[in-house]
Image: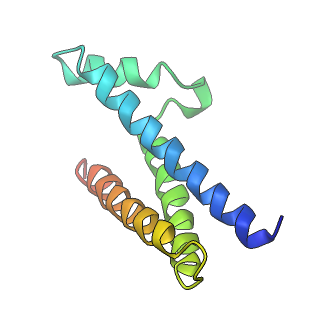
Amino acid sequence: MKSADFLFYLALIFVVIVLADLFLWFAVTAKTIDIEVGRQNYLSYYPSALQNGRVLTVISLLMLSFSGYIFLNASKDNRNRNAAIILGLVSALLLILKIYSFTKHF
């Protein structure tokens, strides 16, 4: 397997991980009224080393930045052009959402 294909699929896995994290947040907080209880329930799904919302957001930002860069480079190739463009846009939108959620607390 070429390194470009490997990086493309790794970037795709990163986007799926971030989407799964976002869906977990929505699923957990939809069950509670109090945001602090929802946040604690959400963080309880992660190991104790990662039970910090800022750390999880920074990890997501790094994964989405990497994915966006890989998809941008892959969009120049004719083979995966359309998929790379769509996934690059999804990465950019998720990156904007994560940056907003990161800076909202300051």
* Closest to the observer, 93 or 5: 5
* Residue 14 coordinates in the image, percent (x, y): 57, 51
Is 56 left or right of 92, judged from the image as shown?
Answer: right
Height in image: 18 above or below 92?
Answer: above
Residue drawn at the location 47% of the way across and 18% of the way down: 44
Residue drawn at the location 37% of the way across and 33% of the way down: 23
* Residue 4 coordinates in the image, percent (x, y): 72, 72
* Residue 50 coordinates in the image, percent (x, y): 56, 33
* Residue 40 coordinates in the image, percent (x, y): 37, 20
The residue lying furthest to the left in this view is 33
Is 103 left or right of 82, judged from the image as shown?
Answer: left
| Rendered-image quadrant of the N terminus | bottom right
Q: Quadrant of residue 36?
A: top left
Residue drawn at the location 48% of the way across and 50% of the way down: 60
* Closest to the observer, 55 or 1: 1
* Closest to the observer, 52 or 28: 28
Q: Quadrant of residue 43?
A: top left
Height in image: 32 above or below 19?
Answer: above
